[in-house]
Amino acid sequence: MLRALALACLLALTPATVLAQTAPNPGADDFDWEVGLWDTHVEVRAPLDADAPWAVFDGTSDVRPLSQGRANTVDLSLASAAGARVEGVALRLFNPRSSQWSINFASMNDGMLTAPIYGGFTDGRGEFYGQDTIDGRVVMVRFVISDVTADSARFVQSWSADGGRSWIDNWVATDTRRTANSGGVH
């Protein structure tokens, strides 16, 4: 009886968020496929400028799980043939209440976090949306993850200055899972 009373008191004092973590959460495993080391090929250009030239970068994305898969980090390291570098880290966090992910990115050029984008996966396609500021103007950001297999995926980031009526791609990446014999830029 005393043991049952103690357990009842413990459960009453345990926050609901802790109890909810033990329940299944649809979407919490959305990024499980991506854990590991990837060769990454990226074409990037200035946001909102459909006439801007594309720059090509190659390198790696190292995806590591955190908190039993409810979060992960992506360590991105890319270089162009001309020696330009793109380095950054993404922190992706799962919200069990909304069954959505947030994606938070920081460039190692300035160490500043961008505004997070939010979304999830439906039928193997991830869509994430948010807002950012370009030259003092608030714009929409869309990030789509598609063509996901065990060994490859495609990522496209787009920007909209007209409330989502039209989008201009500025980041197109293809990841290929790295094997023990893979080379690549680090």
Image (spheres, grey):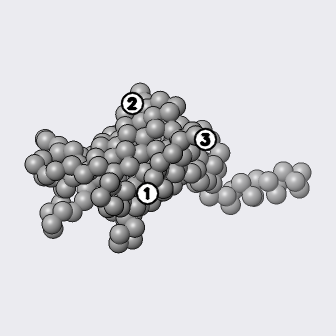
Q: In this orientation, which residue lies closer to the viewer: 28 or 175?
A: 175
Residue identified by numbered label 1: 77
* Residue 180: mark: 3
Task: State the image coordinates of residue 57 (x, y, percent, origin top left).
Answer: 33, 51
> Of marks 3 and 1, which one's residue comes earlier in the chain?
1
The residue drawn where x is 39% and y is 30% is: 147
130 up-or-down from 147: above or below: below
Q: Is residue 90 visible?
A: no
Above or below residue 161? Residue 84 is below
Q: Nearer the viewer, mark 3 or mark 2?
A: 3
Instruction: State the separation of the CA atoms marked 2 and 1.
Output: 22 Å
Q: Amino acid at mark 3?
A: Ala
Instruction: Work out which residue is located at the far top of the displayed protein and give it.
Output: 123
Which label was assigned to residue 147? 2
Q: Secondary structure at mark 2?
A: loop
Pointer 2 or 1: first along the chain: 1
The total of numbered circles placed on residues is 3
**What residue appears at the point 33 percent right and 47 percent down from the top-left corner?**
42
Amino acid type, residue under disc 2 in the picture: Asp
Out of 157 and 184, give the one closest to the viewer. 184
Q: Nearer the viewer, mark 3 or mark 1?
A: 3
